[in-house]
Image (cartoon, grey):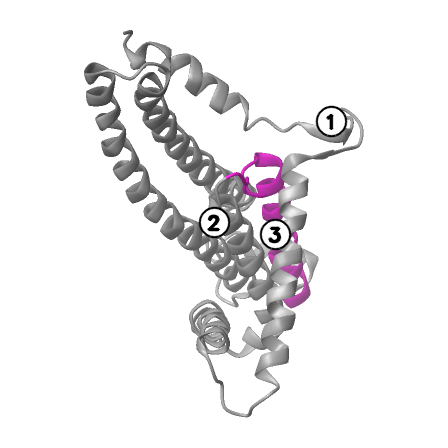
Amino acid sequence: MGNPLDSLGEEVNELVSSFTSQAIFGDLGTVGFTQYSFWFALAVILMLVILFVFKARQARSLVPQGFFVNGMEYLVEFVRDDMCKGLLGDSWKRHFPFIATVFIVVLANNIVGIIPGCKPGTGTISTTAALALCSFVYFIACGIKKHGALGYAKSLAPAGVMFPLNALVWLIEVFSTILRLITLAVRLFCNLFAGHVVMGTFAILASLFFEPMVQAFSAATAVQAGASVLWVAILLVIYVVEIMVAAIQAYVFALLTSVYIQIAESDED
């Protein structure tokens, strides 16, 4: 009876490689539809179905009834009050549709990715970069709309600072603004990717310790299979943590987008 851990490295490498974007049809070098595109589209479709069902049930009564309707209303109110009103002040109504869309799209993809056998649409850097680019373009456009193109560019440097120090500060602020695009994309991708690799690793451990008993039952293999209980228990704990991470990362992504909008529209120099 060999040590199950001997093949762990190979199994984990295979697990990690399975997260690489692969074209379902087409070509990644030109135009292709990857498995992440599929799961992203599926998550968006499920999100739209849930929202339509919510609106249909909500319209049945003036008073919210049922766990589903009340839960959805709480989610909408949470986005409105915590991410929009609390940060954006009087302009919150203008930005609420975008912030709510960003939050729900990211949340839906994160949650779908936790379902066994599924992958998160946000589990590849290309998807998270596209989402981050949408937020980046949006808050830059908000700043330009509020201050004008030249005014927004000038607002990146604080008033009252003498040349050449103000030019240096301006360059730092430009770099910092561009860095927001990168950090939004990388933070979301890394948290989702790392979490799924950890869950997959413990699932592999449970399988490696259980398989010998299936192949040849004996007292030794039965004892070894008992270790699978430990790995499964840890996996369940990590699974619960990943559900929390999925919600938290959607919240952080939308909250930072809201913060960047507030900064772009700020009148303070």
Of the image marks 2 and 1, the number of the one nearer the N terminus: 1
**Residue 101, x across and y down, in percent:** 60, 62
Q: CA distance from mark 2 to mark 1?
A: 50 Å
Of 10 and 263, the residue lying toward us: 10
Amino acid type for the residue under numbered disc 1:
Leu
- Asked whether residue 162 is in view, the answer is yes
Give the residue at x 31% y 14%: 4
- Asked if residue 136 is among those painted magenta in the image, a careful observer would answer yes
| Label placed on residue 162 | 2
Residue 27 against residue 106 in the figure, above or below: above
- Asked if residue 232 is among those painted magenta in the image, a careful observer would answer no
Q: Main secondary structure of the magenta part?
A: helix
Q: CA distance from mark 3 to mark 2?
A: 51 Å
Of the image marks 3 and 1, the number of the one nearer the N terminus: 1
Q: Does residue 146 appear left or right of residue 202 in this picture?
A: right
Q: Which residue is mark 3?
A: 43
| Label placed on residue 28 | 1
